[in-house]
Amino acid sequence: MQTTLYLISPISHLSKMPSGILVIDKPAGWTSMDVCAKIRGILHEKRVGHGGTLDPMATGVLPVFVGQATKAVEFAENSRKEYIAGLRLGLVTDTQDTTGETLESRPVAVSRQELEAALDRFRGELQQIPPMYSAVKVQGKKLYELARKGREVERKPRPVNIYALELLEQAGETDYRLRCVCSKGTYIRTLCHDIGQVLGCGGAMYALRRAMAAEFTLEETVTIEDVQERGEALLRPVDSLFARYPALTVRSAGVERRVRSGGGFTERELADGTYRVYGREGEFLCLSRACGGEVTAIKNFFGA
């Protein structure tokens, strides 16, 4: 019996694997991991991750990284985010949003001016206590696991930064829409809760839409249905995540070999800063930092 061997080139095989970024408009009712699981199934690629968790009730910008592009997830997670949030005054819940159990309902006698004054207290650097219904771990246990068992534990305040916080409009008798630009790790529902506490009437988040994450905006998003129809054609190259940094192309084959080996190189006239470094044929090689004319890699992406 004759056996036929089929040899597959590892390089050509890898080149056909999907790799890039999908900027998804997350639908309400889905977890961020639900979205990743769906993308994993559509594109038939196991390596899928997202750039910052959104609660199930939230919608909006969710960067999803596929294949080799998952190397860049950490840069998206650490970026500032922008949200449009719905604040409902007079309501306190166990989850700090309207999906939870009502703990208190209070009368509301707050003017727009009083609300504006309260917002002033939450701009800039502050310490925020994470909610019990969150994925923050205390002694190895996720807080929401303890909360579901009826337990409440002490949580240490964590530093966050509110870069911008503005009142957009009054949307109902006790409902207001806020715009917030904030650092990684900021809980918008906790912000709504804390604003309500300052005003003395309580507050909870009734809606949340992320307008920007990792510099990607709502105008750049696609839907799950779009991905089902068009698949890999919607993948953005991984270097689109770093578009705010200037591009630098290596000068010679020798320099490119050093970069591909993880080494640095010298560009004496180059200003200090962060750069996207490309090979001579246009392949994105790495994100690098230049200091005193010496260029060293922050993260390598060749092959992504």
Image: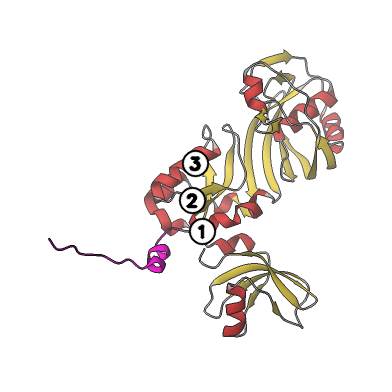
CB contact under 8 Å: marks 2 and 1? yes
2 or 3: tag closer to the N-terminus: 3
Quick one: 43 or 46, which is closer to the camera?
Answer: 46
- Tag nearer the camera, 2 or 3: 2
Disc 2 secondary structure class: loop
Q: CA distance from mark 2 to mark 3?
A: 13 Å
Tag 3 residue:
35
Q: Which residues are magenta?
A: 1-18
Which residue is at a point 39% across and 66% down the rendered structure image? Answer: 10
Q: Is residue 213 above or below residue 249?
A: above
Q: Is residue 100 visible?
A: yes
Residue 68, labelled with which disc? 1
Label 2, residues with CA under 10 Å away: few <14, some 14-19, many ≥20:
some
Q: Position of residue 76 (x, y in %)?
A: 64, 52
Q: Position of residue 237 (x, y in %)?
A: 52, 62
Tag 2 residue:
47
User: Is 11 a magenta residue?
Assistant: yes
